[in-house]
Amino acid sequence: MIKVNAGGCSSFVKDAEYKEYVEKALSAFDVLESETGAGNDFLGWKHLPTQTPDSLISECEAIKDLWASKGVDLVVVIGIGGSYLGAKCAIEALSHSFAKQLASKNGPEIVFAGHNLSEEYICELMDLMKERNVAAVVISKSGTTTEPAVAFRLIKQYIETVYGAKEAAERIVAVTDAHKGALKSLSTQEGYKTFVIEDNVGGRFSVLTPVGILPIVLAGFDMRAMLKGAAEMEKCCGERSEENPAIAYAAIRNLLYSKGKKVEILVSYNPKLQYLGEWWKQLYGESEGKDGKGIFPASVSFTTDLHSMGQYIQDGERMLMETVVTVEKSNRDMTIANDPQNLDGLNFLTGKHVEECNAMAELGTKLAHIDGGVPQISVSIEKIDEFNLGGLFYFFEKACGISGYILGVNPFNQPGVEAYKKNMFALLGKPGYEEQAKALRDRLK
């Protein structure tokens, strides 16, 4: 289903070098499979596709049905990082690009909050909520992460004010820790329906848990098909073989990194996959960027960004590699018509599908970038649907674990993300941070 082709790297690496890194990837695979490496208490994601009970999806469908009976047409999903990026990616990829304008709905409109601290954003969200019938999903293990906690406090107050406390309890669902934390305590106190984020699944690996499953089901998409696609990749990526796409991808990207390719750009030629890049950046950036190591993950959407970033990619500093997510088949058909005047000179395209032009742009760009010193890795899927997205999510997760172990880091922790939080708390006047606040303000003078 997922195919990895490193042919676009052949002029940059030698066969013997690639075989050496395949062996490193196989060794890293063994560590991941035996669960003996660093961070081995965060490997619950590995078997989610095959071990997720159908009853979980049925519970999510029951929430959708309940809210439909209440006329809910707007669901606010509150979360940050891995608590929203996977769901956002899936919903954006599977939705009609102009669903809002066409009023085309499989379910309520899903919007997101708690992923920033912009006062304008939250006020504008409130403007929308005042015009709609609202419910909310809040996603947080602790319930105290600043961005979602601030958003939830405001949205909870709004829902209680408009619908009353009793009705609010049926319009708010929490995805949180099974036993502890502020959000779990509040959910018990208020009577919210809850879903569990297991302790052994980190946020960036949580798209196939209720973190992603609930919003995707609420949006009207087929989560069973997504899990089926992921299960196929769980089987494929569980094989100790050079043909395992996760092993191949982890091997070639680390080999290129050893040769000075410090930045990896994830490329898609379909705008529906823009948020795949955002999800992928967190997955790899947070997993590998530590101990002074790691490939810097970036993303672009072609052909659009060829008219903005293309010059740098073609001729800038040669620290780049590209991983291109190729979609083999379009879900829609459109051919180019003949124009008798031919003022644009495009009659040579008459009768061709627009997607053929897109495919030739992809091939032409590949050759130009290789000639310009940018190696290319191809990751291809058949089409954009739930089955293939599920497979793509799992493939990148498995490859990330292998890649992190090749690099020699713990792929499952994130010690660096706490530094800004401590400074922010101090500057905001959180009790207990007084000395740090004084030191920071002295530095800022």
Image (cartoon, rainbow, N blue to C red):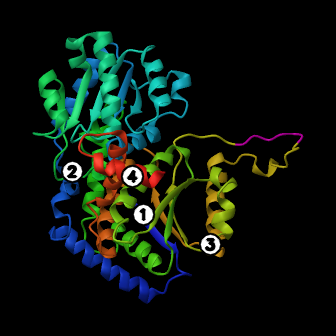
The residue pinned by badge 2 equals 48
Choose between 177 and 25: the one closer to the eye: 177
Range of residues picked out in magenta: 336-341
Measured from the top left, where is residue 315 in percent x and y?
68, 70
User: Distance of mark 4 from mark 1, alpha carbons?
Assistant: 50 Å
Magenta stretch: includes residue 79: no
Q: Which residue is mark 1?
A: 3
For marks 4 and 2 on the same chain, the one whose residue lies earlier in the sequence: 2
350 is higher (above) or lower (below) than 16: above
Q: Is residue 177 visible?
A: yes
Side of 95 relative to 228 (left or right): right
- Tell me the kind of residue under disc 2: Leu
Distance Cα–Cα, label 4 vs label 2: 43 Å
> What crowding class fits label 2: few (fewer than 14 Cα within 10 Å), some (14-19), or many (20 or more)?
many
3 or 2: tag closer to the N-terminus:
2
* Percent coordinates x, y for residue 272 in the rendering: 51, 43
Distance from label 2 to label 1 (Cα)? 22 Å
Type of amino acid under label 3: Glu
Q: Amino acid at mark 4?
A: Leu
Which tag is nearer the camera, tag 2 or tag 1? 2
Q: CA distance from mark 3 to mark 2?
A: 40 Å
Question: In terms of image quadrants, where is residue 307?
Answer: bottom right
Residue wearing tag 4: 440
Residues under numbered marks 3 and 4 in contact, where contact means CB atoms less than 8 Å apart: no
Q: Which residue is at a point 19% across and 70% down the rendered structure image?
A: 37
Name the residue rendered at 40%, 33% in the picture. 112
* Main SS category, magenta section: loop
* Residue reaching furthest to the left: 179
Could you tell me if the residues under marks 4 and 1 are in contact, i.e. CB atoms within 8 Å?
no
